[in-house]
Image (tube, rainbow, N blue to C red):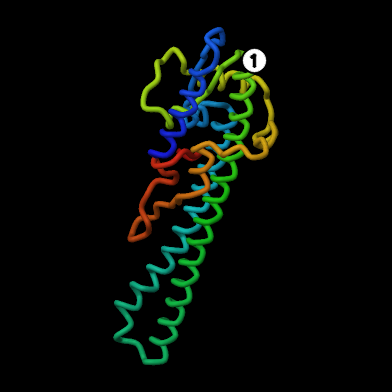
Amino acid sequence: MRQRLVVLMVLIAMACATPARAEIKLAYVDIQRALNECNAGKRAKVQIRGKVDEVTGRLKRQQAEVQSLEDELKKRGPLMRPDQRQALQDEYATKARDFQQSYKNAQDELRQKDNEVTAMIVRDLATVVRNIGEKDGYTMVMEKGEILWGAPGIDITDEVIRAYDAMHVPPGTLGEQAEGEAPSRSARASAGGGNELDLGNGAPSSEFGSKRRSTISR
């Protein structure tokens, strides 16, 4: 964080060092709000939530089977013949292992989908920001999360959202990042962290989508 602030201050100092006749024009964009409020982000959020609900329902059914076998072992196990008890224990162990693997696979799949969609829309938004910056003659357009304070009057998030929505393009079709360009903080964040399914009963408990990072599932 400190390194990013130092780089930002250097860039601002360089901008201020331009000839007096050059107008210094700064703006910032709230990428997380743009993700949440643009049409592409809203549609993606609905699709991801639908997938989460579908996967959660399947895993809960699987978890219920495992719990049922565990309850049966506790209640009837001591009364069973050794071979019957062993067969039930083996079945329980197999289903419990299958559930854990299914849970992990679902986590990985949903996290990957979330990251992919977030990255595509962030790249599109970056292209829109670049276009607005060039058209309106901004010296620099910063991301809100990278600055300590900014006057509301230089927030162009609404303009970015309107411009992106007006294009009516599928996510990820506005072009790749320019060669050598560093990804935005939100794009970097979307590649890390983890989204978890809340199944209760000892399963990892957090809402799908973390408030600690920019993501379309937030």
* Drawn side of residue 113 relative to residue 92, left or right: right
Residue plotted at (45% across, 50% down): 193
Q: Quadrant of residue 209?
A: top left
Q: Measured from the top left, where is residue 94 in percent x and y?
A: 48, 76
Q: Residue 28: x, y in percent?
A: 48, 22
- Answer left or right for 184 relative to 81: right
- Which residue type does callout 1 highlight? Lys
| Viewer-nearest residue: 159 or 7 | 7
Which residue is identified by label 1? Answer: 135
Report the residue at 47% width, 32% height from top. Answer: 32
Depth check: 123 or 1 in front? 1
Residue at image x 59%, y 45%? 116
Residue 29 placement (x, y as % from top left)? 49, 24
Q: Quadrant of residue 131?
A: top right
Q: The N terminus is located in which quarter?
A: top left
* Tag count: 1
Of residue 1 and residue 92, the one placed in the foreground of this image is 1
